[in-house]
Every structure is written in C-alpha cells, then in structure tokens.
Amino acid sequence: MQILDIKVMNGPNYWSVKRHKLIVMLLDIGELEQRPTNKIDGFLERMKALMPSLYTHRCSEGHEGGFFKRVEHGTWMGHVIEHIALELQTLAGMECGFGRTRDGGREGVYHVVFSYYEAKAGIHAAKASVRIAEALIAGEPFDLDYEIQKLREIREEERLGPSTGCIVEEAIRRKIPYIRLNRHSLVQLGYGVNQKRIRATIASSTSSIAVEIACDKEETKNLLEAAQIPVPRGTIIYDDIDLERVINRIGYPVVLKPVNGNHGKGATTNINTWEEALEAMAAAKQYSRAVICEKFITGRDHRVLVINYKFVCAAIRTPAAVTGDGKHTLQQLIDIVNSDPRRGYGHEKVLTSIKVDSFTENILQAKGYTLDTVLPAGEELWLKPTANLSTGGTATDVTDLVHPDNVFMCERIARIIGLDICGIDIMAPDLTVPISENGGAILEVNAAPGFRMHIEPTEGLPRNVAEPVIDMLYPPGSSARIPIIAVTGTNGKTTTTRLIAHIVKQMGYKVGYTTTDGVYVQNQLMMRGDCTGPVSAEFILKDPSVDFAVLETARGGILRAGLGFHNCDVAVVTNVAGDHLGLGGIDTIEKLARVKSVVPRTVLKDGYAILNADDDLVYNMRSDLECRVALFSMDENNPRIKAHCAEGGLAAVYENGYVSILKGTWKIRVEKVTDIPITFGGKAEFNIANTLGAVLACFTRDFKIEDIRAALQTFVPSPAQTPGRLNMFNFRNFSVMLDYAHNAHGMRAIGKLVGRIEASRKVGIIAGVGDRRDEDTIELAEEAARVFDEIIIRQDKNLRGRSEEEIIQLLSTGIRNVKPDCTIHVIKKESEAIDFAINNAIKDSFITIISDVVPDALEQVKRLKEKEEGVVAMA
C-alpha cells in the first residue's frame, strides 16, 4: 500500500462542516483492491488478538462488534485502516470517533478520513495504521505498545495544557472562536478588535506589574506583611553564609525556594538538617541567584483560586506518596499506586503516574531507603518535595469548607498584588477557621496558577474554573466576534469581495479583506499573492485593528485545510462553473458545487446565505442550510425569485435598468446600472450580477440604501480598486483591457462585454492552465475564438505539470474548432506578448489581455501608456 497524500483539516471542510479536525489520507491499496478482508486468511483473528478493543466499533452495523462483522464478511483495507487509526488514538488517550472512507476517483485509491485530537498525532496514526494493516496481512508481529506510547508523547508535546485547554473548551461551549497562536499555550479568543489572549492562565487583562510582583517572592511577602496578612518569617539569601545565618535565627524546619520561581520549581520544604539545606540551596540556585529562606509552617498545603478578585475554589494538595503494608517494596508500592486507572501519562487522566526522579532518590537517600526497601505497615512516605499534580500529587476539593474570613482575606490578597487570576498557597491545619487563629500563613501568590487540581480533583467536586475566566474576559452583552462576510463561487469572487469591502469601509468600519491578489487591511496591502485560503482568513481575523472581515474563499483552501473560520454571518455564492475539475478528487461539477457549499453551510442561524437563483447548482444549496436565505437574479420574473418573495423572502434583481431589492412584495430601487461604474453602463452583465450579490449581502447587515448607493457610485474599475478586473486603458489610437478570466465561463462573460464594444479589430492574449482537463482548455479557446479576430497564445509562468507544446496545441485546437481562419501568434512570455499586441495595434482596435501575473502586467501597460503620453506631450 502507498500513502499518496495526507491533508490536515482544521476548519469546516468538504468532508464535514461540523467536524473540523480531520485527517484526509489519500491511500492506494494496490492489489488489495482485489482482496477484501474475507479473502485474507486469518486476518480477522490476528486483528482481534492485536487490537481487541476494536470490538467496541459499531460501524454501519450499529452495534458493538459491528466492525468485526464487516471484516468477517469482507471489507476493503482503506476502511480497516480508518478504524485502526481511530482506535490507535483512543488507546493513546485521545478519544476520536468520526471516520469515512470514500472512493478516490481511481481504482484502488481511497480517501481515508478520520478525526484527530492533535494534528501531528493524527498524521502519525495515519501512517502507523497502514503499517499495522500490512503486518496483519502478512501475519507479522507488531509492537502496538510502542506506537501507543509514541502517540502519547506526541499528544503531550503538542496539546494545550489542562489549564489553557479548559479555558478554550469553555470558550467553545459559548461559541467563542479561538486561534492557537503558537505551539505552546498562547491562544487568541475571539476575532479582530474583540479578541482577547490567554497564555496558560495569564490573560490579556492581567497586569504585567502584578505578574512581576508575584514572581518576586520577597516583594510579594513584603506587600502582604505590610497589609497585616500572615506570612512566614524569613529573608532573601545569596550564599551558604547567609543560609547558615538565617537558619540560626529562625531555626529548623525551613523552606528554600528561588525568588523568581513558579509552579514549585526549585523549591524544597521541611528541611531539617544542614546537609538537606545545602542540597536545597543548590536546587533553588538553578532557577534564581537570590533564594528565599523562611520558616516551614506545619499544616496542610492549600491552594485557593481567586478570579476577577472573587473567591472561586480551594483544594488541599498532597505530594506523591505511598503507604507501607510491611510486604511490598517501595518500587512495588509505586507500581501499585500507578496501576490506579485514574493515573496516566502526562495529563491524559485525572492523575499523573509517579516517576522516580532525582528528588525521589534524594528523599530515599535521606531516610536510608532504596527502592527495594519494604516500608513498614501504615508508614506514609512522600516521594516528592512539592505537591504538584504533574509529579503524581493528589488534590482534594475543600471549596465549601473555607471560612468567610479566609475568603475575604484571599480576595483582598488578589487586590493587593493586583492579579485578576490568582493562585494563593496557604499552609494551615485547615481553612475552616481563620488562619490568623490556627497558625497558618500565606506561602506564595502565583500568577498563571494551574487549574488541573480544581477541574479534576482526586476527591471532591470538580469546579468549572474556566467559567469565571470567560465571564471576566467577555462580560454579558459583549461580543467575541466581528461580522464576517464570506464570498465563494467560480467567477466574480474577487470583484464581489472588493465591492462589499468598499461598501463596508464607506460605512465607517475598519475592514480587512482577502482576495486572489492579496490581503488588505483598510485598503493597505499586507500580503501579495493568491490569498483565498484559511491562512489568509486567519491573518485578517487575528488583526486587532479589524472590526469587519470580508473573505474571498476559494476551492483550493477548502480542500487543502478547510475554512479559516468556523462560522460567518453572510455567505455569497456567485456561481458554479467547470474549473479545476479533476484536481483533489473533484472531477464533476456537482462535486465542485459541494465544495463551494461548505461556505454557506457555515452561516450562523440568524445570518444569510446569498445565492444565485439563475444557477441551478447554487440555488440547490439552499436545501442543506440552517440559516436564512436571500436570492439574487438577473431576471425579476425568475420563478424562483417570485416564489421566494411570495413567502416573504428577500431578493435582489436587475429590473428595468435598476439594481433593486425585493422584500416580499415590496420593491426598493437601489441604483441605475448606468450609474454604477463597474457595470460599464450595463455592458458588463457579469458585474451586474456581482453587484446584486454584494448589495444584498450589505442590505442584510442593515446598511442604509442611500449609503449602499453612494458606495456603488464611487467603486470605479481601476488598477487601484479592482486590479486585474476589467482595467481599461485608452491609448491614443486603440484601447486595452486587462482581466483575469481563467476559465471558459469567465471567458464567455468577457466575450459578452467585448462583443458590445465597437472596434476595428479585437485582439486577445490568452493562455491555458496545465492542471486543467484537455476539454476545459479547448473550451476556453473556443470561447476566445468566438470573440477575437486575432489571438496571441502566451504561457503562464507555472505550467502545472504540462509542457508548453501540449497547452499550445490544445488552445490552437479550440480556436480552429470555431474559427479555422483566425490569426494565431504564439509568444510564450507574457510581457513580450503584451509588447507585441500594443506595438502592432491598428487604429480603433481593442486588445484584451487575460493575465497570469496581474501586478506585472498592470505595471507594463501603465508604463507603455505613460510612454505614449510622454511622446504626445513632447510633440
């Protein structure tokens, strides 16, 4: 078997608009196409022995054991690999349940689609599942435990930590979008101007001064002591001489911890000898030059969590420990504790397995124990110096037992330090009485406190501590989103996107938009190139200055990685025509329509899908939508428009020379097309259709008609506002138009416009695209031949898998099919083709340049125009 391709979906996609995180593996199973599982001797038995947990997979049978039944009766290897990949991830602590295996368009080739928890783990599972299937077929042994452990390690390396993760999960529950900004714990919640950021449990609202104070243990202690908060006696030390002096003053037991430490790093508690003190000093010095030495307060280790200066919860923390039974060795006792099903690798379960490390070895050495020591019955031995859950510690929730005086004190501490998310470490016998009465003390105040002990305590009630964090970042009535209008279709996307962005900008918004020629924020070009995929969409949504997004969305990005947003407010679908067919498994126009339909299917329920009622494939998308629908048409008598409006629907139509809105039976005329520059006095019908979609999209956002009208009048087709889209240049004796029409449908639309233009000779510069089907390239040339008297064939910079000769031959065939006597020139370089056309232009001719690299072609034509004007001026 051969893996041909692996794609990672991270947004609404062709395979599912609800399940965003999918691996799409293109797999060639080769000769196994002729050998389903029931024809492979012993395959099912070996699978059951290696992965018995696959019994829980119901598959299409709908009951446990259903998948095994399918294997018994015979299924193909792509389907088997889908299930293995899902179960592998589940066994590694990543519950994944969605899978699909579909025909890949060629015999023996399949799209194996399955959900993932972390992308790198999903990719590893895809590759490992193929290896497992091959081992099962061959009857060879396979080390499944190695693959499971490898997946666990990838998961722990890639996943968000439990604290950040629970905040993100709470945001998802509230339908607040998020974007992970790095491989670690920096996450953006919300979009554009409404975004907030978190890094672990530090929020964008958290005071940097407060974090600095909390990280300086001595400064924290001084502030609390000045505010009459109980703290342990002690001071900062720098060397062993200081250490000896302070211990002589305050006496044993003591605690040593780095001044700038956090999460217990470098801290040692309950130090009772000079030797222990020297070891602890060395450990603390690894994290900070200055070390705090203070009196060890006896009692239990409590953590109180205060969020937005309100008490949220409290827990008792206990270090990793074992209790002797007089029979088992220490190593055996650790193994018994680790056999608890609640313990696992890293953060995969409520508790973390206990590992023997240098801290453990030091504790054992100090007591004269080894791992082979049999601990006396009833003796409890702490195996770590601190009570962190990540090292095997446990937590017990005591929220409901905290005395009101202690609640008041903790809320006051958070305000004294200025921390809006604050973890307070208290050593006290308990918190049921004020700590001022039972000898307790505040040990530390922590910025970025861990949430795991509260969301998954070993004992007691779990607390949703992420809820008050989200409440703080997004109080009731505030929004995390910005309006998003997404535009898709085969042709007209860019013009429609630019027109909508222009209207939005005229309304006073700071608009960010993506197009095939670049990414723009407030008309400032941020990135150049074809920017219609998810990365470009996220670029806009991450920009903190943007309060309205208009996103051109093309098929390539949807198939490559899914959408860059989870939901939009309005989706416009211009049309669906044959283009890029045969790529990415999309070999029919119906499948292409399904790809485009991903965009309107993501519209929020109270939003609008703006559909072209003149296009059957677009109009039929409405049946899959959960949102409201508005239609547009070039014919007000279109039966679909009439039926829709009769039911009170919203539509936009071209009628009696006007762009008009229909609200039920009411008609609102927006503007005459002759006063809308991009329609070229009504000659460019495709731009009338683009205008209808744009106007309707803006109308659904409650923009006023007079504002829309004013914006339409000021949107002029030019290199500045619509680069590469109907850019006209009037030379002294001839005219030049530059456009991006790159398929037969687009060429047909250009042909209608050019057909209405008076000219002595019509010249076209065209090219074919290497990744199109033969028939598509021929059809494009046929459309060109119907329009132009003379055609110059050029070549794109990227031939996309074909030779120049192949493309030229296909284009020539198409031209000759329609116009055998057409004058054809072959000038491969675009710049030379443009020079040839302009230098040889006859009086009153009209040259149409269908450009590949729009910016270069525009600059060249502008230079030639300026050169002519300079010559005229000199004359």
Image (cartoon, rainbow, N blue to C red):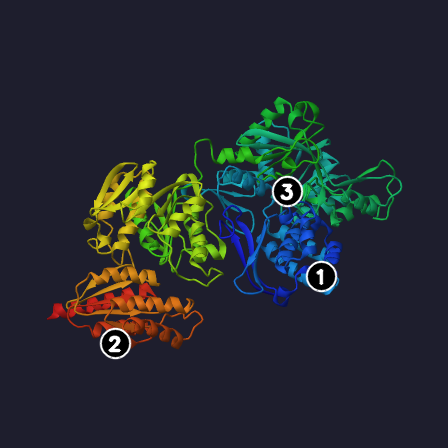
**The one of 99 and 401 positioned closer to us in this rendering:** 99
CA distance separating discs 3 and 1 = 46 Å
Q: Secondary structure at mark 2?
A: loop
**Viewport quadrant of the C terminus:** bottom left
478 or 637: nearer the viewer: 637
Residue type at mark 3: give it: His
Left/right of residue 341 with respect to residue 420 in the rendered view: right
Residue 685 appears at what percent x and percent y?
25, 54
Q: Residue at x 38, y 66 (%)?
A: 776
Q: Quadrant of residue 109?
A: bottom right
On screen, 512 above or below 726? above
The answer to whether residue 441 is above or below residue 66 is above
Residue identifier under label 1: 136
Q: CA distance from mark 3 to mark 2?
A: 82 Å
Residue 507: x, y in percent? 29, 42
Callout 1: SS? helix
Tag 2: amino acid? Asp
Q: Residue 745: horizontal and vertical position, in percent?
A: 33, 60
The residue nearer to you, when weighing 675 against 758, is 758
Instruction: Give the mark nearest the N terminus, 3 or 1.
Output: 1
Camera-nearest residue between 633 and 535: 633
Q: Which mark is residue 263?
A: 3
Which picture quadrant has residue 769?
A: bottom left
Q: Nearer the viewer, mark 3 or mark 2?
A: 2
Residue kind at label 1, given as amino acid type: Leu
Residue 740 screen position, x and y as percent: 32, 62
- Residue that sits furthest to the left in the current view: 875
Q: Which residue lies under the disc numbered 2?
A: 821
**Disc 1 to disc 2, how far (Cα)?**
64 Å
